Image (tube, rainbow, N blue to C red):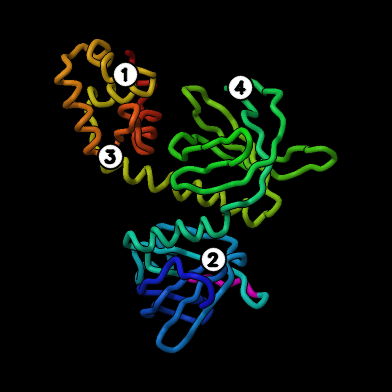
Amino acid sequence: MNDSVVADFTTEVIPDTGEYDEPVHGRVLMNREQVVIVTADDRTSFPIDGVFDLAYGSAPKEMRRFFEDTVTIAYKAAGQKRVALVEGADDVVERFTNLLFKGILNDTPVTVKHPARVGGRVTDASFRRAALYLSPPAVRFKSDDPLTIDVSTVSHFERVRRKIGDDERSMLSVRHADRGEVMTTEIGIGSERKMNVLGRFLRTEYTQLREELEDVSLSEEEIEAMVGLYSGATEGSLAGMLGVDASRVTYLLNTLVEKGLLEESASGMELSSIGTLAVGEHLEDVNL
């Protein structure tokens, strides 16, 4: 394999569902150009720019007797559409999935309109050029006016048609929270394949965050503390807001850090991606 290898691991695989009826043990390698799956009897390779769909999670129904979790990779090779399955029940394969998403999407030229809407109001913002980069669980748009959308703030996305100049183009419309306001950002990608993969990335990241959040139990007081921070409260003002003393606030914040809902930064406590998702779910239930 030419170029530097960014992934190299062994697991159970089905290199091509059209050729294999059940998984075999194999080695998976990836560089910036291709993925190679090596088994005892075969070697399957496909270019990263041939991948047109990618899903991480439950195995397809007909394969669940073999796999619990998989990475499902739909790709084109030699003019044929094929599907590979890689067992995905560990962190190594999750990192491989993120590398594959990045390999497909990073440095993709896009047009972005932000915000296209604020609440229900259509803005007069114009489309601007940017380069798309993934930083799971966020999508970043590098330009003179950079933008980051954290998947934990996304409440809805869909395909829409928009006219840019004389052309009508397919766009991805993403509704998300930004500094406490609900906004809609519209993203145009010239490649239909990459548009599909970006949508899949958003679904995959959101599903993983939801699954992590389901494993976390929260008290009413912890939810109120997170909503307070989200609303702009400082650690110093939380005590008065919650009606507790400073030592109780310290205990609550440390507990939320241990649960992965808060992160310590140079400017103080900040919500993690899971914490942001939790606040979005409970925001309307809290009156501070």
Q: Is residue 272 above or below residue 48?
A: above
Mark nearer the N terminus (2 vs 1) = 2
Q: Residue at x 64, y 57 (%)?
A: 193
Foreground of the two, 17 or 40 = 40
Q: Whole-Å distance between the Cαs marked 3 and 1? A: 19 Å
Q: Position of residue 104 (x, y in %)?
A: 57, 58
Residue kind at label 3, given as amino acid type: Gly
Left or right: 134, with 125 as reference point: left
Q: Whole-Å distance between the Cαs marked 3 and 2? A: 32 Å
Q: Residues within 10 Å of mark 4 (few under 14, many from 20)?
A: few
Q: Which residue is label 4 attached to? A: 120
Residue kind at label 4, given as amino acid type: Gly
The dot on residue 260 is 3
| Circles 4 and 2: CB atoms closer than 8 Å | no
Magenta segment main secondary structure: strand
Q: Residue at x 71, y 34 (%)?
A: 127
Q: Position of residue 135 (x, y in %)?
A: 47, 47
Q: Whole-Å distance between the Cαs marked 4 and 3? A: 33 Å
Magenta residues? 80-84
Residue kind at label 1, given as amino acid type: Thr
Which tag is nearer the camera, tag 4 or tag 2? 2
Q: Which residue is label 2 attached to? A: 32
Q: Which residue is label 1 attached to? A: 234
Tell me if residue 243 is in the magenta stretch.
no
